[in-house]
C-alpha cells in the first residue's frame, strides 16, 4: 500500500454547529452528532466514540465497523466513521437556524467525495444562520465567535471569508463518488467529532458508502510541528 500523500498546509472545510452554554456560563460550540461533541478553543483532536456509544444503545450498532470496534484506535480510522467532519463545498444548510462555518484541519485526514474526516481541527470563521430564530440567538452566535477568537460574518460572506483563511482539499486528491452509494440513506453522523456542514452530514453526503464495503477514500497527512498548537491562517 502506497504511503499517504503529505500536504504542506492545513485544509479548510465547511460545517455547522449549535451554540450552547458551558458550566461557567460561557458560549460553546457543539457538534450535533456522536456524543454531542464540545469544541475547545484552539486545537480539537478527534476520538472514536462509536463503539462505546453503541454499547450504551445511543448509536446504531449497524454502523460499527471492525475497526471502530477496536479500542483504542487512532481517529480518523480508514475503515471507520470517526474523525472531525468537514465538507469540501458550502451547500444549502441542513438547519437554517444554526450557524455554519469553516474549519482548518490537519494531521491524519481521510478524504471522501463530499468531504473529509480529520484528526485535528480548529474553527476558522463562523457565519450567522440564514434564518436566525431570534436576536438573542444572533447575539449568542456572535459571543461564541468572540469567545473562540474567530470572525463572525453574514451568511453570504462565508465562502469569501473561508477562502482568505484556508484552502480546500485539492480536487485531484478527492476520490470519485461511487454511484451505487451516492444516495444511500443512512443516519446523520453530525459534525462530529462533524457535519458537517452546511449540508446534512450524512454518510452518503460525504460519500462514506456502506459500512460493510467502505466507499472510495484517500488518506492524507499534514503534520504540523506541534499538533497541540493550531496552525495559523
Image: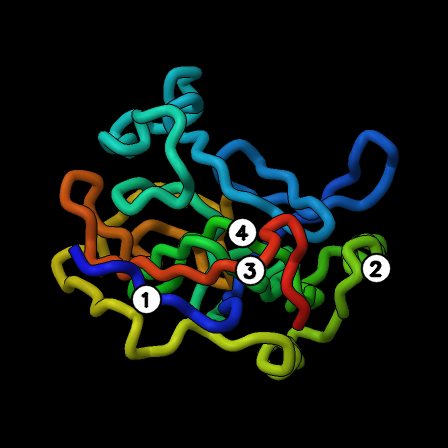
Of residues 228 and 182, the one nearer the viewer is 228
Residue 12 seen from this side: no
Q: How many marks?
A: 4
Picture quadrant where residue 24 is located: top right
Of the numbered discs in the image, which one, if any, rests on residue 120?
A: 4
Residue ID at (83%, 53%): 147
Secondary structure beneath label 4: strand
Residue where numbered disc 2 is placed: 146
Residue ID at (56%, 44%): 45
Indicate the position of residue 53 as horizontal and vertical percent values: 44, 23
Looking at the image, do the residues carrying marks 3 and 4 touch, with CB atoms under 8 Å apart? yes
Q: Nearer the viewer, mark 1 or mark 2?
A: 1
Picture quadrant where residue 205 is located: bottom left
Indicate the position of residue 19 as horizontal and vertical percent values: 71, 47
Of residues 231 and 64, the one nearer the viewer is 231
Disc 2 crowd rating (10 Å Cα; few below 14, some 14-19, many 20+) is: some
Disc 3 crowd rating (10 Å Cα; few below 14, some 14-19, many 20+) is: some
Residue ID at (58%, 38%): 37
Looking at the image, do the residues carrying marks 1 and 3 touch, with CB atoms under 8 Å apart? no
Residue where numbered disc 3 is placed: 224
| Disc 1 to disc 3, C-alpha distance | 15 Å
Disc 4 crowd rating (10 Å Cα; few below 14, some 14-19, many 20+) is: many
First along the sequence among labels 4 and 1: 1
Disc 1 crowd rating (10 Å Cα; few below 14, some 14-19, many 20+) is: few
Residue where numbered disc 1 is placed: 5
- 48 sits left or right of 36 in the view: left
Secondary structure beneath label 2: helix
First along the sequence among labels 1 and 2: 1
Picture quadrant where residue 123 is located: bottom right
Q: How is the image coloured?
A: rainbow
Residue ID at (77%, 55%): 148
First along the sequence among labels 4 and 2: 4
Amino acid at each position: 500500500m502506497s504511503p499517504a500523500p503529505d500536504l504542506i498546509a492545513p485544509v479548510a472545510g465547511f460545517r455547522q454547529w449549535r451554540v450552547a452554554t458551558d458550566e461557567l456560563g460561557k458560549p460553546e460550540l457543539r457538534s450535533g452528532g456522536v456524543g454531542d461533541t464540545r469544541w475547545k478553543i484552539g486545537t480539537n483532536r478527534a476520538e472514536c466514540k462509536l463503539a462505546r456509544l453503541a454499547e450504551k444503545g445511543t448509536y446504531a450498532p449497524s454502523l460499527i465497523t471492525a475497526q471502530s470496534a477496536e479500542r483504542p484506535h487512532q481517529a480518523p480510522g480508514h475503515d471507520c466513521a470517526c474523525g472531525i467532519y468537514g465538507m469540501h463545498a458550502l451547500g444549502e444548510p441542513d438547519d437554517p437556524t444554526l450557524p455554519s462555518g469553516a474549519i482548518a484541519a490537519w494531521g491524519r485526514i481521510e478524504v471522501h467525495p463530499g468531504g473529509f474526516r480529520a484528526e485535528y481541527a480548529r474553527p476558522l470563521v463562523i457565519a450567522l444562520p440564514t434564518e436566525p430564530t431570534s436576536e438573542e440567538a444572533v447575539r449568542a452566535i456572535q459571543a461564541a465567535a468572540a469567545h473562540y477568537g474567530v470572525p463572525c460574518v453574514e451568511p453570504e460572506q462565508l465562502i469569501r471569508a473561508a477562502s482568505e483563511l484556508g484552502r480546500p482539499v485539492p480536487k485531484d486528491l478527492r476520490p470519485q463518488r461511487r454511484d451505487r452509494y451516492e444516495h444511500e440513506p443512512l443516519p446523520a453522523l453530525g459534525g462530529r467529532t462533524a457535519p458537517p456542514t452546511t449540508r446534512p452530514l450524512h454518510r452518503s453526503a460525504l460519500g462514506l458508502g456502506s459500512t460493510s464495503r467502505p466507499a472510495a477514500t484517500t488518506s492524507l497527512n499534514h503534520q504540523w510541528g506541534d499538533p497541540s498548537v493550531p496552525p495559523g491562517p
